[in-house]
Image (tube, rainbow, N blue to C red):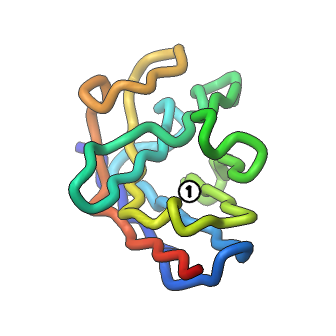
Amino acid sequence: QEHLVESGGGLVQAGGSLRLSCAASGRTLSRYSMGWFRQAPGKEREFVATIIRYSSTTYYAASIKGRFTISRDNAENTLYLQMNSLKPEDTAVYFCAAHNGDVAITAVGAYDYWGQGTQVTVSS
């Protein structure tokens, strides 16, 4: 059973930056392809970014491409999401997730393990 814990959320002004972390326990994070998702109030959970295991190929949602960067530190067993040039519409609870595949997956239902989420609020 993979256990994921997000941290790093908070309140930031528009144009600011935050770095989210996702710490994994139970198994080595490098064995999984990882993703970041977000869910705003009243909206469905949506894909943000993914990084493929072994190759570290990345893929991003169009809405955040060029502003967010997903990365992983296998030695620290941690996944990151660097978020720059934040906008009020980025306000949401951000979740990390893991799956066993070797392709970029954007579907929520395809991920096997989820963290509890961390709140990001961007003020205008």
Please tell me in which quadrant of the rendered image residue 19 appears: bottom right
Q: Nearer the viewer, residue 111 or 72?
A: 111
Q: Position of residue 117 (x, y in %)?
A: 33, 63
- The structure residue drawn at horizontal position 44% and vertical position 17%, both measured from the top left corner, is 101
**Is 38 located above or below residue 54 in the figure?**
below
Please tell me in which quadrant of the rendered image residue 106 appears: top left
**Is 88 located above or below residue 58 in the figure?**
below
Q: Of the residues shown, which amino acid type is indicated by label 1? A: Thr
- The structure residue drawn at horizontal position 71% and vertical position 76%, both measured from the top left corner, is 16
The residue identified by callout 1 is: 78
- From the viewer's perspective, is 23 left or right of 14? left
Q: Which quadrant would the C terminus be assigned to in this image?
A: bottom right
Number of residue marks: 1
- From the viewer's perspective, is 115 left or right of 55? left
Q: Position of residue 111 (x, y in %)?
A: 31, 31
**Is 25 located above or below residue 32 in the figure?**
below
